[in-house]
Image (cartoon, helix red, strand yellow):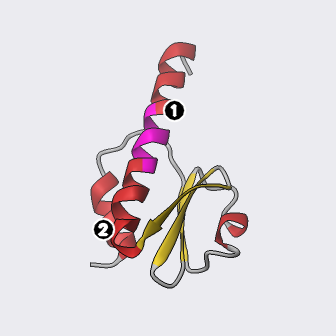
Amino acid sequence: MGIVSAVREAICDIAAPVTVAVMGCEVNGPGEAQDADVGLACGRGVGLIFVNGCVVRRVSEEEMVPALVEAVRTVASAKEALNANWGG
């Protein structure tokens, strides 16, 4: 299973509107997907996890999917909490 399919399957239960980007370049990825809430920019054997265009973590190839899913769930929880607190 590819990265995108694995991530889609792992986050299908999230109701909060979270934009996720998976990019193939660790140099330009975060900038090119700066409008995404969460993203992964893949490099040779490594990935950069970014939130709102800022790199927050560097992970090995094996950690890419779990780390991205964790970041998506964190952002989704924050959005849900804001929505609950502000009634939006």
- In the rendered image of this protein, does residue 28 appear above or below residue 75? below
Q: Is residue 73 magenta?
A: yes
Which kind of residue does numbered mark 2 sit on?
Answer: Ala
Q: Earlier in the sequence, mark 2 or mark 1?
A: 2
Q: Is residue 85 magenta?
A: no
- In the rendered image of this protein, does residue 40 appear above or below residue 73? below
The stretch in magenta equals 71-77
Q: Which mark is residue 79?
A: 1
Which kind of residue does numbered mark 1 sit on?
Answer: Lys
- Provide residue 80's location: percent of width, then percent of height: 46, 29
Left or right: 4 with respect to 82? left
Assign the magenta stretch its main secondary structure: helix
Residue located at (68% from left, 55% from top): 53
Q: Quadrant of residue 55?
A: bottom right
Residue beneath disc 2: 6
- Provide residue 39's location: percent of width, then percent of height: 54, 60
Helix, strand or loop under label 2: helix
- Provide residue 1's location: percent of width, then percent of height: 26, 78
Left or right: 22 with respect to 31? left
Residue located at (51% from left, 32% from top): 79
Residue located at (29% from left, 56% from top): 10
Residue located at (56% from left, 80% from top): 24
